[in-house]
Image (cartoon, rainbow, N blue to C red):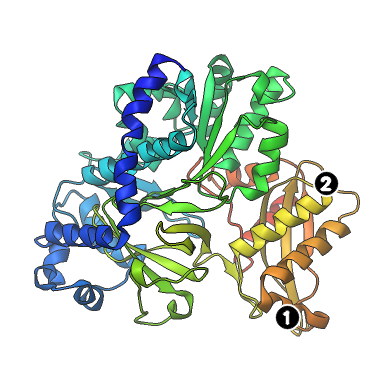
Amino acid sequence: MSVLNEILGFFIKRRIERINEFMHHPHETQFGQYSSLIKKARKTEYGKRYGFSDFKNIQDFQREVPIVTYENLYPEIEKVLRGQQNVLWPTPIKLFSKSSGTTNDKSKYIPVSDEALESCHYKGGKDMITLYLNQNPESDLFDGKGLSIGGSLKENPYDSNSQVGDISALIMQNLPSWAEFLRTPPLEVALLDNWEEKMARMIEICPKENLTSILGVPTWTVVLLERIMEITGEDNLLEVWPDFELFVHGAVNFQPYREMFTKRFFPSDQVRYQEIYNASEGYFGVQDDLNRIGEMLLMLDYGVFYEFIPMEELDKDHPKTLTIEEVELDKNYAIIISTNSGLWRYKIGDTVKFTSKYPYRIKISGRTKHFINAFGEELIIENAETGITEACEATGLVIKDFTAGPCYMADKSKGGHEWILECSSIPSNPEPFIHKLDASLRSVNSDYDAKRQGDLALQMPKVHFVQEGTFYKWMERRGKLGGQNKVPRLSNNREFLDDLLEFTGLHS
């Protein structure tokens, strides 16, 4: 182990004491976050409007402050975008995380305070390393560099005194010098606006570095790694980076990509995989036990107060919300956050399940808007990704991307689901995969199974296999290249499905 590993490892691992504190005292930690947020924001426009100074308890807060979506909160965010301060948060807002999302082409501008950048996003990155080193004390992570695929940064079009960009770009732009020394590519490449130019420069630079880790969205990381393999002509990437040991992933479920990484890119037990839950709105979770695949420790002291809406309450005008001490295991909840950037009771659109308490661990189960329920089947992303993974394992196919939506029959009496799957090689006989996918979905979703009984309401899935690179080209045509943009997995209408079918020349 190098001297640098020993020094940085020593300081970073000292943070485990703080993490242990909130793991053992989660309810007190969250109450402290709530109290601090309310106290600090009580004299903001929003705080005065809803009487933050008068709240005696969390129940007052839940009764008086409405649950909001981005669209609901946008009038306040627009004021901040145009330079007005003390609207949602008392300290100056000079940064905005720009996110297009996956269901709306209109850009979202999420305010990012200095407090959020430091005590949420940067804290999350440090804790990610802390938790990794805590499990792998002999790691040589700092003997090489970490590759991170960033976004771009621009002047705020509404106020020249502030900047907007992908959250990754905001983080990179403000990294301390010691952290910048340990990463690649250089900042001028990482923040390039043109995605193809950025990829070309990274393909030129990265094979020459001693990479020990990568942080990125699997979808776009795969594109980069495949191109590097093409350029170098190596059989796998450990021949390019022999000291590589860690891939940190987030934003999309890793299971459909796992086999590609473990067998094609990094075929060795020396490489480990760690999941994080970070978004434009905040850094929420880190996988603290690498053996618990898909489960992440909910980070409770990042300036975020959490509430959870049971799914049966989601569509009500005034849904019941639960604090962390009220949740149950293995139930789906929509997440509501209040943050140190001024997002108050904000519905971020993700759904989670709790897998443990003390410590509180979660796994992402889907999106509140990403599901198929055209026939009462309530198919969520978690079901779809489980089905894809099990069908791949049974048939040996490697699926790189997919999307699905409802398929209505001409007589309206029976319907089904239509899938578009991108794979490395199109199967000559797709039937085994389709039947396994259907069987897996029936095993994990009782509503889907009931509708499939005797083809009562749902017929066998209709599946199209498309060539490798199809989704990339489709996203490029839509102007959605980059790590912040994700392929829409499920939709309750045919908007994305029909657009992709038209793009590929397939016919539904």
Q: Residue at x 12, y 72 (%)?
A: 51
Please say whether residue 151 is visible from this viewpoint: no
Q: Which quadrant is the C terminus positioned in?
A: bottom right
Pointer 2 residue:
426
In the image, residue 263 above or below residue 361: above
In the picture provided, is 397 more to the left or to the right than 401? right
Residue 443 spot, x, y in % from top left:
72, 70
In the image, residue 413 above or below residue 112: below
In the picture provided, is 265 more to the left or to the right than 335? right
In the image, residue 44 above or below residue 64: above
Q: Residue at x 51, y 47 (%)?
A: 485
Residue 498 spot, x, y in % from top left:
67, 61
Disc 1 packing (10 Å; few <14; some 14–19; many ≥20): many
Pointer 1 residue:
451
**Of 275 and 415, which appears nearest the observer?**
275
Secondary structure of the residue carrying numbered label 2: loop
Q: Residue at x 38, y 42 (%)?
A: 167
Quarter of the image where one finds residue 133: top left
**Of 69 and 331, which appears nearest the observer?**
331
The answer for how far apart the CA atoms under marks 2 and 1 are is 29 Å
Residue 88 spot, x, y in % from top left:
19, 58
Q: Amino acid at mark 2?
A: Ile
**Of 40 and 363, which appears nearest the observer?**
363
Secondary structure of the residue carrying numbered label 1: helix
In the picture provided, is 149 more to the left or to the right than 94? right
